[in-house]
Image: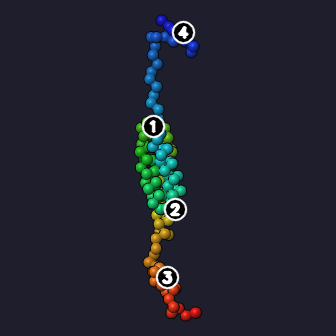
Amino acid sequence: MSEQTSYGTQSSDQYLPPAPPAPRNGLGTAALVLGIVGLLLVITVAGGVICGVLAIVFGFVGHSRAKRGVATNGGAAIAGAVMGIVAILASAIALYFYWPRGYDHHGCALAATSPCIQK
């Protein structure tokens, strides 16, 4: 027995298999976005480290999903994890340059305003 529809003839005896589930690409995309944001926030040090750590975690979880076949963007997940690592390293370098290295700023400021400075 068949029915006539606007799309053609369809038999009531045949059923289509269920559609495969859509890929779950959210973690790979989140890793990529957090890696980019982490690189942009390196100047704030804390922003670069926080976004970098999250990008690494999301990147590795997203890559493991891609290896299992649940997600399709394993490359984006790895790219996000790599950018997260670069963001953390760049934040560490920025912190090295921001951190005071034993200079006595208070003593220097007092000496500059002291009336005993000879001109």
Q: Where is residue 4 drawn, in percent x and y?
A: 54, 9
- Marks 3 and 4 close (CB-CB < 8 Å): no
How far apart marks 2 and 4 lie (CA) works out to: 66 Å
**Among numbered discs 1 and 2, the one appearing first in the sequence:** 1
Q: Quadrant of residue 9?
A: top right
Query: Viewer-nearest of labels 4 and 1?
Result: 4
Residue 54 circle label: none
**Among numbered discs 2 and 4, the one appearing first in the sequence:** 4
Residue 86 in view: no
Categorize mark 1 by other alpha carbons within 10 Å: few (<14), some (14-19), many (20+).
some
**Among numbered discs 3 and 2, the one appearing first in the sequence:** 2
**Among numbered discs 3 and 1, the one appearing first in the sequence:** 1
109 to 28, vertically: above or below: below
- Marks 4 and 1 close (CB-CB < 8 Å): no
Residue 24 circle label: 1
Residue 43 circle label: 2
Residue 23 in view: yes
Give the residue number, with chain letter if any, for mark 3.
109
How far apart marks 3 and 4 lie (CA) works out to: 91 Å
**Among numbered discs 4 and 1, the one appearing first in the sequence:** 4
Residue 4 circle label: 4
Query: Seen in the image, is 48 located left or right of residue 8?
Result: left
* Amino acid under disc 3: Ala
